[in-house]
């Protein structure tokens, strides 16, 4: 059950729209860069939940390089319980710092992955929005964000900071050190 994921330990739980969504793929690629040592030091679990069948987990992890915990909620029961919406609220213009593709190219890549993937399906409801939750230990909710549209992800470093985890440099540029 869902409670087992956070009952004994604080958890960052990220709900993705679906495993074909290019914005979710690129967001999870950045989640993959969070070192396990940072999470262990803060005693926090990092979990991604998708809304497709379990057989899509391994290919998605392989595609994104994600090695932390991943589960699925194919009936979207947890999504519904938390109030995650279907459809996009386009009145909010946001740009996720973790999304690198533009809409056209990202959509084409998603469609290509659907057609060439191991099981030709759309891996969940394409209208379902995701979100992020920091919960536990026990039933203490520290933070909840419900995505309004496909680009409305909470910046990963914001979630890490709120959970007490060290932040990560997601830039591909080497750090500049003043001497």
Image (cartoon, helix red, strand yellow):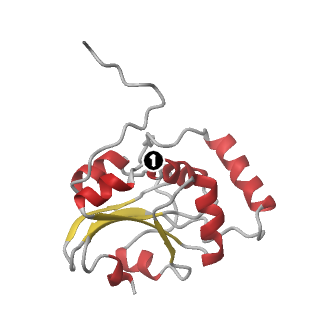
The quarter of the rendered structure image containing the N terminus is bottom left
Q: Secondary structure at mark 1?
A: loop
- Residue 54 image offset from top left, x and y in percent: 60, 77
In the image, residue 94 above or below residue 129: above
Residue highlighted by disc 1 = 33
Which of the two residues, 43 or 31, is positioned nearer the viewer here? Answer: 43
Which residue does the image show at 68% across and 49% down from the upper left?
107
> Is any atom of residue 133 visible in this view?
yes
Residue projecting furthest to the right: 116
Which of the two residues, 173 or 100, is positioned nearer the viewer here? Answer: 173
Instruction: Determine whether, in the image, residue 14 is placed left or right of residue 58.
Output: left
Snapshot quadrant of residue 95: top left
In the image, residue 113 above or below residue 5: above
Which residue does the image show at 42% across and 79% down from the upper left?
78
> Is any atom of residue 53 visible in this view?
no
The quarter of the rendered structure image containing the C terminus is top left
- Residue 152 image offset from top left, x and y in percent: 43, 51
Instruction: Determine whether, in the image, residue 64 is placed left or right of residue 135.
Output: right
Which of the two residues, 152 or 70, is positioned nearer the viewer here? Answer: 70
Which residue does the image show at 45% across and 62% down from the upper left?
68
Which residue does the image show at 37% across and 80% down from the upper left?
81
Residue projecting furthest to the bottom: 1
Circle 1 crowding by C-alpha within 10 Å: few under 14, some 14–19, many from 20 = some
- Residue 61 image offset from top left, x and y in percent: 58, 61
């Amino acid at each position: 059950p869902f409670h087992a994921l956070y009952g004994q330990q604080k958890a960052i739980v990220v709900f993705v729209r679906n495993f074909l969504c290019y914005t979710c793929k690129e967001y999870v690629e950045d989640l993959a860069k969070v070192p396990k040592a940072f999470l262990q030091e803060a005693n926090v679990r990092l979990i991604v939940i998708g809304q497709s069948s379990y057989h899509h987990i391994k290919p998605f992890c392989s595609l994104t390089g994600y090695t932390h915990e991943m589960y699925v909620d194919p009936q979207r029961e947890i999504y519904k319980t938390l109030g995650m919406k279907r459809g996009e609220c386009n009145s909010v213009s946001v740009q996720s710092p973790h999304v690198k593709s533009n809409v056209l190219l990202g959509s084409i890549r998603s469609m290509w992955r659907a057609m060439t993937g191991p099981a030709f399906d759309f891996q969940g409801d394409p209208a379902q929005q995701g979100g992020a939750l920091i919960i536990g230990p026990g039933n203490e909710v520290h933070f909840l964000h419900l995505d309004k549209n496909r680009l409305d992800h909470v910046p990963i470093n914001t979630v890490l900071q709120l959970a007490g985890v060290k932040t990560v440099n997601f830039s591909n540029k080497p750090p500049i050190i003043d001497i």
